[in-house]
Image (tube, rainbow, N blue to C red):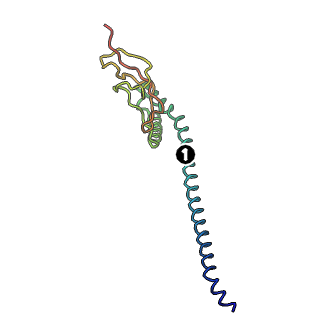
């Protein structure tokens, strides 16, 4: 007589076990989703840390890019074709490519209209050009995408005094 009672309990037990299995499965799915989210967040933080460290290094390199540019502006004409100068120019070119690979570009200056968001005026020069036009670059400026990292130091045209 015990056997019929077992059969009556079996559907209830089966239902309980199925609910328990469903709870375990849902818990496992939540844990898996939490793990995936954690992994994504950790990767994002690692990427941000690398970008932060890279940005710091690049900001330290940008003055070197400008120093190369300034040095070549003052290079005596008779030395321009020297082999060692060609080697230094090659290094400069590689440095420029490196910063370009990170989306950093020089801010356009000479001939451009003065833009206080990109240019820092360090002087005025009497000129025939339209007033407020950049006539000389004193120090190279850099931007990354649309953000100015270092403003360009420039001299701006003003009307000639009569």
Q: Residue at x 66, y 86 (%)?
A: 6
The spot of residue 29 in percent (x, y) is 57, 65
The spot of residue 8 in percent (x, y) is 63, 85
State whether residue 127 is above or below residue 23.
Answer: above
Q: Residue at x 30, y 20 (%)?
A: 130
* Residue marked by disc 1: 48
Determine which quarter of the picture holds residue 135. top left
- The local secondary structure at tag 1 comes to helix
State whether residue 94 is above or below residue 81.
Answer: below
Q: Which is nearer the eye, 5 or 38?
A: 5
Q: Residue furthest right?
A: 2
Q: Residue furthest bottom?
A: 1
Total marks in image:
1
How many residues crowd mark 1 within 10 Å: few (<14), some (14–19), many (20+)?
few
Q: Quadrant of the N terminus?
A: bottom right
The spot of residue 96 in percent (x, y) is 45, 38
Q: Quadrant of the C terminus?
A: top left
Q: Which is nearer the eye, 17 or 113?
A: 17
The spot of residue 125 in percent (x, y) is 37, 16
Determine which quarter of the picture holds residue 53. top right
Q: Residue at x 43, y 39 (%)?
A: 145
Along the horizontal axis of the image, is 134 left or right of 52? left
Q: Which is nearer the eye, 82 or 90?
A: 90
């Amino acid at each position: 007589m015990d056997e019929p009672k077992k059969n009556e309990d079996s559907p209830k037990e089966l239902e309980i076990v199925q609910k328990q299995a469903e709870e375990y499965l849902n818990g496992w799915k939540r844990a898996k989703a939490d793990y995936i989210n954690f992994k994504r967040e950790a990767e994002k933080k690692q990427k941000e840390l690398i970008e932060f460290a890279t940005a710091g290094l690049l900001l330290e390199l940008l003055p070197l890019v400008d120093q190369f540019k300034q040095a070549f502006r003052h290079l005596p004409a008779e030395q321009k074709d020297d082999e060692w100068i060609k080697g230094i120019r090659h290094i400069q070119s590689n440095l420029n490519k490196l910063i370009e690979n990170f989306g950093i570009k020089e801010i356009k200056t000479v001939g451009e209209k003065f833009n206080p968001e990109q240019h820092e005026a360090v002087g005025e020069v009497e000129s025939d050009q339209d007033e407020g036009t950049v006539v000389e670059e004193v120090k190279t400026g850099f931007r990354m995408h649309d953000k100015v990292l270092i403003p360009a130091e420039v001299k701006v045209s003003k009307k000639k005094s009569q």
